[in-house]
Amino acid sequence: MSTPDLTAAVTRIWTDVLGLSGADDAGTFFDLRGDSISAIRLVARLEDELGVVLDVADIFEEDPDLAGLVRDVAARTS
């Protein structure tokens, strides 16, 4: 998957799981009111849709913003 396609896919999953509109997606996972259930949903969707395996603990430990999550997913796909 190309970088723009990967970025678009991760962005789509992130905004859907967190219930965001495009204008309010700045901030980290927890800044955007992510919780344990949404972390599980995010990790599951990334695996189901992109084949990328992340641990839910990674979300809790790193509290990524969207750009950080895209970088982490990209690193795991190459």
Image (tube, rainbow, N blue to C red):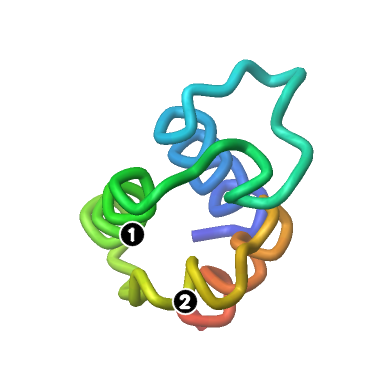
Q: Are marks 2 and 1 in contact (CB under 8 Å)?
A: yes
Q: Position of residue 53 (x, y in %)?
A: 31, 74
Nearest to the observer: residue 7 or residue 63: 63
Residue 72 position by quadrant: bottom right
Q: Percent x, y for residue 64?
A: 64, 62
**Which residue is at a point 57% across and 22% down the rendered structure image?**
20
Residue 66 relative to residue 33: left or right? right
Residue pointed to by mark 1: 43
Residue type highlighted by circle 2: Asp
Q: Nearer the viewer, residue 74 or 21?
A: 21
Question: Residue drawn at (34%, 53%), measured in percent from left and top?
Answer: 36
User: Relative to residue 55, is residue 22 depicted above or below?
Assistant: above
SS for dot 1: helix
Q: Looking at the picture, how far across and down is residue 7, in whole percent?
A: 62, 50
Q: Which residue is mark 2?
A: 58
Q: Label 1 is placed on what type of residue? A: Val
